[in-house]
Each structure stands twice: as C-alpha cells, then as structure tokens.
Image (cartoon, coloured by chain):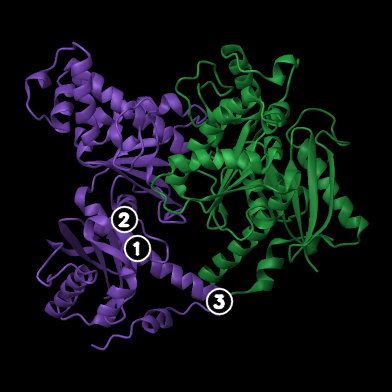
Chain colours: A green, B purple
Amino acid sequence: MDYYFGVDVGGTNIKLGMFSESGRMLENWEIPTRGRNYTEVGKNDIMQNIAGEILYILEERCISRTKVRGVGIGVPGPVLDNGYVESCVNLGLTDINPSLVLSELLGGIPVTVGNDANVAALGEMWRGGGIGYQSLVLVTLGTGVGSGVILDGKIVYGAKGLGGEIGHIMVNPNETDICNCGGRGCLDQMASATGIVRNAGKILKDTSLPSVLRGMEGFTARDVVDAAKAGDPAALVTLDYCMQFLGKCLAAVSYVVDPQVFVIGGGVSAAGDFLIRIIQEHYEKHAILKKEKAKIVLAVMGNDAGYYGAARMAMDKKEERHAFLARTDGIYCDTAAIHGSGSGTN
Amino acid sequence: MDYYFGVDVGGTNIKLGMFSESGRMLENWEIPTRGRNYTEVGKNDIMQNIAGEILYILEERCISRTKVRGVGIGVPGPVLDNGYVESCVNLGLTDINPSLVLSELLGGIPVTVGNDANVAALGEMWRGGGIGYQSLVLVTLGTGVGSGVILDGKIVYGAKGLGGEIGHIMVNPNETDICNCGGRGCLDQMASATGIVRNAGKILKDTSLPSVLRGMEGFTARDVVDAAKAGDPAALVTLDYCMQFLGKCLAAVSYVVDPQVFVIGGGVSAAGDFLIRIIQEHYEKHAILKKEKAKIVLAVMGNDAGYYGAARMAMDKKEERHAFLARTDGIYCDTAAIHGSGSGTN
C-alpha cells in the first residue's frame, strides 16, 4: 500500500493526517507549531518539525519512505501556484517555497502547498459539506472571514495567491471603522465573530431594543447567536444586519464564478440551520439572475478540513503529473511517474 | 491543411471567421442574424443560417467537410458547460443545445458553444489586450456591462452558466432606480454607457457645476467622455463617480479569482487611457491586500473578439479531447481523435 500525508499549519498547532492511497484516513495527530525542534525563529523550523513527525511515524510503522506518494500542506497566507510563499505573518515564514524545503527534508517526497482556507475548501468538497460537488466556495466565519474557491475540483490560487480572499471585499460603504487590512466596510468587519460582537455593541448603543446582552460584560458571538435563537430582539437584529452583508457578498461571488454550493464553516457556523436560513434569505434576494439558486450548507469537518484537504491536494497533484506525462511522453506510465520522483534512501 | 470556424451570434448580425489549424484568420464576414433562410421564428433558423454559411464557403473554396476540426459559437445568454442554452431572450432561442443542432446540420463537425462575453474574453486573451496572460477578466462597457472570466486559459462557465456576470453585482446600495434585472445598484446601472448618461443627468440636476452637457439635448456617453477629456467639471465628476463603482467591483473580483489582468472593452472604452487611469486609481484604492496590483488594459479587438474567441474555444476543446483520450486510452493518437469524430459524407 502507498500513502499520502496532509498537514494543516496553524498559528498554534499543526495537524497531520496519514492517508492510504485510496484516501482512507489512517491516523491523525497534532503538535504545537513551535515544537521540540524549535530553537530560534527561522523559516525552516516549522518545516523541520513537520518532516520530523512524518519521518518518525514512517519509522514507527515500518513504512519505507518510497511508499509515500506525496505530502500536502496548508499554510495561513497567500500561496502562488508554484508553491511560493511571500509571507505568512502569523508564522514568521517569509520568502520560502515550503514544497522545496520540506521535500528536501523528506528525501525527495513530492510536496504540494496551498493556502489553508483553500485547502480546507478542498477538504469540505472531498469529505464534508460539499461532497458530490465540483465547484464550491467555503466561507469560514471565525475571528475573521476566510474563504476558498474550488472550480472544476481545483483550488483557484489566483495570480498572486489571493484567490478566495472574500473577507476583504468591501460590502458596506457606510462603515466608519477601519478593517485590519486598512480598508473600510470589508465583509470581515461585518460577518466574522468579531464583527458580530462589534455590531451588536453598536446596535445596543444606537437602539433601545431589549436584550439579555445588555447585562453581559464581554459577550461573545456565541452569546449573540444563542440570544437570537431564543428570540432576543437586539440579537436578532444584529444577526440579520451582519448576515445581510454575507448574503450580498455571496450573490456577488455567484456572479463571478457561479459555484454549485456555498459551504459555511468556522466558529459562528455552530449556529447551524438557524444561521443558514438567514444567509440564504439575503443571498436569494440579491442573486436575482440565478433562476436556480446555489445551495448554502454547513461545513461539517471543523478543524479536520485542513489536513484532509491538504492530503487531497497532494493526490490531485499526482494525477495532474500523470496527465501531463501522458500528454508529453505519449504513453501513460504509472511506474515511471511514481518512482521517478521519489529518490528515497529508505 | 485543416480548419476551424469561429461564430459570434449577436442580436443583429452574426460574425464568422475561418481559421487555419495553426490559428491564422483566413477570412471573415458577417450576415444578418435573421438571414436568407429565415421564414418564421423557430429555434433552428439561426443554426441553419450558420450551417448554410459554413457549408457554402467550404464548397466555394473546394474544402472537404472532413478538413474542419471544429466550430466554436458564442451566443448572448447563459451557457452550461455541456453547451445547453436555456434561453437567449434576444434571439428567441430557448431550450436548445446549439452544439448538437449545428453539429448535425454540419454532418458531424464538432461544435462548441459559449456565452458571447466569455468567448470575447478568450479572444482578447488570444490575440488582443490580454496576450501573454492565462487568467483575465474582460469587462465590456456598452449599453450594459458584460464580462467574461478566464482562469488557467479556460472560460469559467459557472454551474448554471452565470460565470462572469459581474454587471449585476450590487455595488451601490444607495441607488434608488431599478436595474433591468430587477435589482438595485448593479454595476450595470453605474458604469455602462446608459449608466454614464443617467448619472450625468442626475449630477447636472443636483449640482450647479458648469457643463457643456447642459446645452445638449439627448447627449451620449461619448459626449460625456469627450467633455471630461476637455476638462468639463460636471463630466469629470460623472466619470469619476461612475468609474469608482467599477474600480471597487474589480477589487472585489480580485478577491475572488485574482486575475493577472483586467481588459476593458465596449463602446465606452474608446475613451482610452484617460478612462483606464480613472478606473485604475479606484481599483488600487480598494485592492489593498494586493501588493502587486493587477494590470488594467484596453481591449483591442473590438467586434472581432467574439469570433476569434469562438474559434479558439473550438481549438481548446480539441486539445482537451486529446488529453482525455491520452488519459483514458493510454496512448496519444492524433489520427483517431480527428477522424473518429468527423463522419463527413463529402
């Protein structure tokens, strides 16, 4: 049996999964992002940690390195489609091609790199809320608004790695606060967990709507959602206000790439179908040209989407290389494609 | 030598081009959309006209039908990627797969169908303002705002044929007039030729800015642009006002698919670099996350983009079939691919 690995690099933890060649998840585990090999801030530390984990489990399970067909890795920053990462500010990674660095540390195993949100979108398509679809947009409503765009089963990287950054589309020209990005009125400011709390505060201040939130010090987006579900007037107005911008934005995205389905994930999506119905209503109001509206569904993979998607990305890359070889060499040769790239010393 | 045909079906005229297999344009001509075979409104009339033209020129030039590798056709309406057209309102075409109908009329020559704006985008990429790029968005500023999205050299059709309909993205929530689509504040209402005239009228009414437009009965977008170029205060304010929405919208599109270049075409683009500079300024103000901004350039092919792009689409389809055969059969076989599909009776 041959193997793939999927790796999801976050600011705090790195999640890893080992998969069979047929896509079955065999083992998964996580390590701190700054792990045991960490000595000083340097761009190879994280890659060394990851390589160390993969090589360790291979030895532990008595698996030859040549049996690993590919490793996929998702990182929190823009990634060009050649794998180059200009900067992942949260990780201190700059000017690096993780695929080259990690591949070398792994003795030549092919490594594919993608943006974490794009890779999570692939994970949701493969095994999550987007099963059965070939084109989808994942939107994660967490501290910020992340997103990934998949068309024809493939990640849209974008010319400069900025495909699927819908969190910074300007949706509210009347917003006065400034977004982290320097803009004003970004979706991120309106529909993220942070945005929900901020807008709830404004609505509590500007209206006299009754609300349980008035008595809470430091309420969270979860509190707003729970209150709204219980019929709290100010919380309901807040959620409707915030999600109108998401609905409008999804309509705009429909008019650019027209996906089959939108998948909503991130902490705020714990609100479930209650939230989906609000988003869907605003989306349908604005996606007027679409006779048959796109579906909006919940993400189901949570924090597993990243490493699943990363593994899937590595598998897809393998297939692409096959197709390329078939086109250029004229003959589809599975063995050459597999063994040609892995110079494993075992 | 083998041949391709590109066909651009408009409301008034159908433009046709004959191309060599290497992509050289050999002849082009146009016919009225309701031409000599037109007897009554029926969905096959237009297809019969097109087939008649192609068969006529083949006979005229003593070219065997088996020498035609493919025909591409652009139509003004949403097209699914299997070629199905639910409705082209302007043409009275409904519930038709033009590729099947036309292919049958042509004795089995493969026919590929696309939306006219998407096909024009492909034309501009191939031989126009987008030469050398693999991902671009064409925006045509005419009576309405049309657009086409190309990623990795391929048209983004969208799940329901609505890829690249950016003209109906809501960009101005403060707009009070209703758009043709039923929405309010669409880009189409703000940045089309019609939109420029409408907004100029409002600005003349709401301000006391001096303007040569005040003395003109029924001025056009061209008049507004010409006046702006001459420094006319109200015309300058109008153009800046209208193009701010286009700039914002292009920034939003950047955050979805991040193309290498935006190509601006349509009648309004006759304003040239003067217009591009205004759009670019607004785009850059809003595409904050993009360190290296996408280029914005002028379309150069005018009404030729459509049939060029349609021919190119037919050529690409041919290549895809090759790759597919290579993947499935294992052996790249040019002759089988060509002769297998053309059952020409000749």
Q: What separation in Å lies between label 3 and label 2 (alpha carbons)? A: 33 Å
The residue lying at 38 percent from left, 66 percent from top is B83
Is residue A164 among the parts visible in the rendering?
Answer: no
Question: Where does label 2 land, which residue?
Answer: B77
| Amino acid type at mark 3 | Thr
For mark 3, give the secondary structure.
Answer: helix
* Tag 2–tag 1 contact (CB < 8 Å): yes
Q: Which label is found at residue B85?
A: 1
Of the image marks 2 and 1, the number of the one nearer the N terminus = 2
The answer to whether A184 is drawn above or below residue A306 in the figure is above
The residue lying at 19 percent from left, 17 percent from top is B205
Q: What separation in Å lies between label 2 and label 1 (alpha carbons)? A: 7 Å
The reply to whether label 3 and label 2 mark residues of one chain is yes
Q: Which label is found at residue B305?
A: none
Is residue B98 among the parts visible in the rendering?
Answer: yes
Of the image marks 3 and 2, the number of the one nearer the N terminus = 2
Question: Where does label 3 land, which residue?
Answer: B328
Image spot of residue A147 (x, y percent): 59, 40
Give the crowd class for mark 1: few <14, some 14-19, many >=20 residues within 10 Å: many
The residue lying at 70 percent from left, 28 percent from top is A227
